[in-house]
Amino acid sequence: MDPEGNVREFNLIDGGVAANNPTLLAIGYVTKTIIKGSSDFFPIKPMDYARFLVISLGTGSAKAEFKYHALSAAKWGLLDWLTSGGGTPIIDVFSQSSADMVDYHLSVVFQALRSENNYLQIRDDTLTRHVSSVGVADKQNLDDLLIVGERLLKKQVSRVNLKTGRVEPSKHESNEEALTRFAKLLSEEKWLRLARSPHGHTPKPKPNY
């Protein structure tokens, strides 16, 4: 509804068509905010990615191992690319590859800046049965998703191996430990900003980790 009270209609499509992994959009938004001179980011410079903390949380996807085979795909026609193996290969390839390229690009950037610990991606692409569906919201499925999330916290942090392009587990910390570390850094940054604020100084509470 516009300011005059007239109802307007918008026809929209899923944002995943343009940004299946929206992490770059988030970084771009912060960068533009810094360029505009926001006091919240002073004295960080627009390209000072080493000061960025990035958490990318995936919503989970079905296990796709051996879903499509190169030998059979080589013989596909138009209809096969649209529907084959119980899925839509062309959409699967587009969405997964675009998301993976964002992850690879950011991994390269943060590793080049020796700040790979500032970029954390948590996702599970091994889901099966109903937990891989986006349309099942019954109590049983929600309970199962909770178990998936708790199990994911215990897994080691995964990072892209720049030599192979494969996502490999790190030996240094689990996802839960990485999130705790991020929370501590963010909390410390919050109190530093409050200390610099002209609106008063709030005493820093004792941490409770």
Image: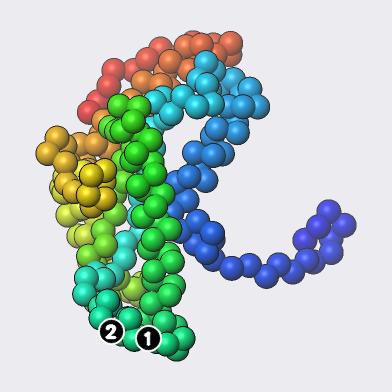
**In the rendered view of the protein, which quadrant contains the N terminus?**
bottom right
Q: Are marks 2 and 1 in contact (CB under 8 Å)?
A: yes
Residue 204, horizontal then vertical, whole percent: 37, 15
Looking at the picture, which amino acid does disc 2 mark? Ser
Q: Secondary structure at mark 1?
A: loop
Q: Residue at x 37, y 86 (%)?
A: 76
Residue bearing mark 1: 76
Q: Residue extending furthest right?
A: 4
Which is more toward the observer, 169 or 123?
169
The image shows a total of numbered marks equal to 2
Looking at the picture, which amino acid does disc 1 mark? Trp
**In the rendered view of the protein, which quadrant contains the C terminus?**
top left
| Residue 37 can be seen, yes or no | yes
Residue 145, horizontal then vertical, whole percent: 26, 63
Q: Residue at x 36, y 20 (%)?
A: 188
Residue bearing mark 2: 72
Which is more toward the observer, 79 or 144?
79
Instruction: Please identify the quarter of the rendering in which residue 42 is found.
Output: top right
Residue 117, horizontal then vertical, whole percent: 28, 32
Q: Residue at x 43, y 28 (%)?
A: 49
Q: Is residue 201 above or below residue 173?
A: above
Q: Residue at x 40, y 21 (%)?
A: 189
- Horizontal side of 108 relative to 181 (left or right) equals right
